[in-house]
């Protein structure tokens, strides 16, 4: 376990997965967007694997209509397993069982799409008073450069909540939550950590407090729930998690401080068609089974592309 042993380990994570997936229609007409495969695993499995690798093995997924496939994917498939066993297809059998062994899965349901903040609030009873992580399914963090262990360390050092940030161009910032940041005193012993003094959900380029965008990884204390209950609808008329965390930054005595870890590793936006294709190609080209042939084909393919 990558967590410090003298503190109570953080084991709970919330994964909101109630979104409609409109960006991938018609593929997502009858199938959750989280089930779209990245190479041969559904995108959501990478996220559950990331949580489990950081010791977060009590996972509540917040689903909605049309999402049954998610529950089925993380559950045993006894008939299929029996069939594979009978056929002696043991590698496949193992791959089918893998998703069921990662974590204890719990499910909550968001009655209507009222925003990310509302989805997280659905998990209040599950979380209780413990600090917990939130992982958004559209952001896929490459397993070679995990960020959750650093976020946990920062929480253990400073208390309060921790969010992940990444630097984006001024043109891109309006697609994200944007953070007002201040450097922390040197000597904290942890690199790339800033203090958050404010947050704005999807600001225009001119109104963004910085180019630091909120990435879909959060480590929150249970104080967030009280704030969420009082957070009015914000951007898009939805209850925004960003607005609630912005409020936390003002309530030092009740839930603050909020720190940010600046992520510099590989991340894919699988909620976007281009990002999804890039993730699929990149991860497939690095696989030992598919990579050699795919890379060869890609090189020829690129040569034949018009300028
Ligand atoms: C959500 C958050 C936003 C964050 C983004 C990261 O937006 O509201 O603050 O920057 O995830 O992926 P969404 O992409 O769900 O619209």
Image (cartoon, helix red, strand yellow):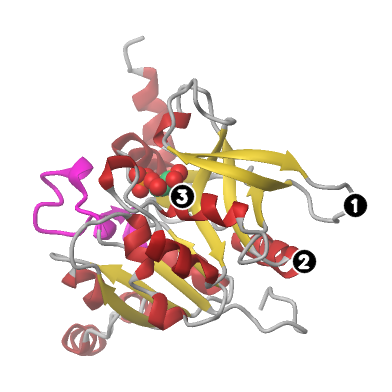
Left or right, residue 106 beside residue 69:
right
Look at the picture and state if 22 lies above or below 66: above
Q: CA distance from mark 1 to mark 3?
A: 29 Å
Mark 2 neighbour class, 10 Å CA radius: few under 14, some 14 to 19, many 20 or more: few
Quadrant housing residue 256? bottom right
Left or right, residue 252 beside residue 132:
right
Q: Is residue 300 part of the magenta span, yes or no? A: no
**Residue on which the image places disc 1:** 187
Q: Is residue 21 part of the magenta span, yes or no? A: yes
Left or right, residue 184 beside residue 147:
right
The label number, if any, that marks residue 269 in the structure image = none
3 and 2 marks in contact (CB < 8 Å)? no
Say which element carries label 1: loop
Quadrant housing residue 43? bottom left
Nearer-N-terminus badge (2/1): 2
Q: Is residue 235 visible?
A: yes
Quadrant housing residue 24? top left
**Residue on which the image places disc 2:** 157
Q: CA distance from mark 2 to mark 1?
A: 12 Å
**Residue on which the image places disc 3:** 242
In the rendered image, residue 114, in percent from the top left (x then y), is placed at: 25, 56
Q: Is mark 3 within 8 Å of ligand 1?
A: yes
Task: Name the residue located 51 percent from the left edge and 74 percent from the top edge.
Answer: 52
Q: Which residues are magenta?
A: 19-44
In the rendered image, residue 198, in percent from the top left (x then y), is placed at: 58, 43
In the rendered image, residue 113, in percent from the top left (x then y), is placed at: 21, 57
Say which element carries label 2: helix
Quadrant the N terminus occupies: bottom right
Task: Name the residue located 68 percent from the left edge and 73 percent from the top edge.
Answer: 2
Q: Is residue 103 visible?
A: no
Left or right, residue 263 beside residue 129:
right
Mark 3 neighbour class, 10 Å CA radius: few under 14, some 14 to 19, many 20 or more: many
């Amino acid at each position: 376990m990558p967590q410090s042993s003298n503190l109570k380990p953080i084991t709970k994570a919330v994964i909101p997965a109630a979104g409609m997936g409109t960006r991938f229609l018609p593929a997502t007409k009858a199938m959750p967007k989280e089930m779209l495969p990245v190479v041969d695993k559904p995108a959501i499995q990478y996220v559950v694997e990331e949580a489990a690798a950081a010791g977060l093995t009590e996972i509540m997924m917040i689903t909605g209509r049309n999402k049954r496939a998610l529950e089925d994917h993380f559950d045993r498939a006894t008939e299929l397993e029996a069939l594979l066993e009978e056929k002696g297809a043991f590698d496949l059998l193992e791959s089918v069982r893998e998703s069921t062994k990662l974590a204890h899965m719990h499910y909550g349901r968001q009655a209507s799409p009222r925003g990310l903040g509302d989805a997280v609030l659905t998990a209040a009873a599950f979380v209780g008073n413990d600090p917990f992580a939130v992982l958004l399914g559209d952001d896929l963090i490459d397993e070679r450069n995990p960020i959750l262990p650093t976020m946990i360390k920062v929480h253990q050092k400073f208390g309060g909540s921790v969010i992940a940030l990444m630097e984006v161009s001024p043109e891109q910032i309006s697609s994200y939550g944007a953070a007002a940041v201040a450097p922390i005193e040197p000597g904290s012993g942890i690199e790339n950590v800033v203090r958050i003094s404010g947050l704005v959900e999807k600001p225009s380029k001119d109104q963004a407090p910085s180019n630091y965008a909120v990435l879909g990884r959060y480590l929150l204390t249970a104080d967030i729930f009280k704030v969420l209950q009082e957070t009015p609808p914000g951007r898009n008329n939805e209850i925004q998690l960003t607005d609630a965390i912005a409020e936390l930054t003002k309530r030092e005595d009740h839930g603050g401080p909020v720190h940010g870890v600046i992520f510099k590793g590989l991340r894919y936006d699988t909620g976007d068609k281009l990002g999804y294709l890039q993730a699929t190609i990149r991860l497939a080209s690095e696989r030992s089974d598919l990579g050699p042939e795919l890379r060869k084909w890609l090189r020829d393919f690129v040569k034949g592309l018009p300028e």
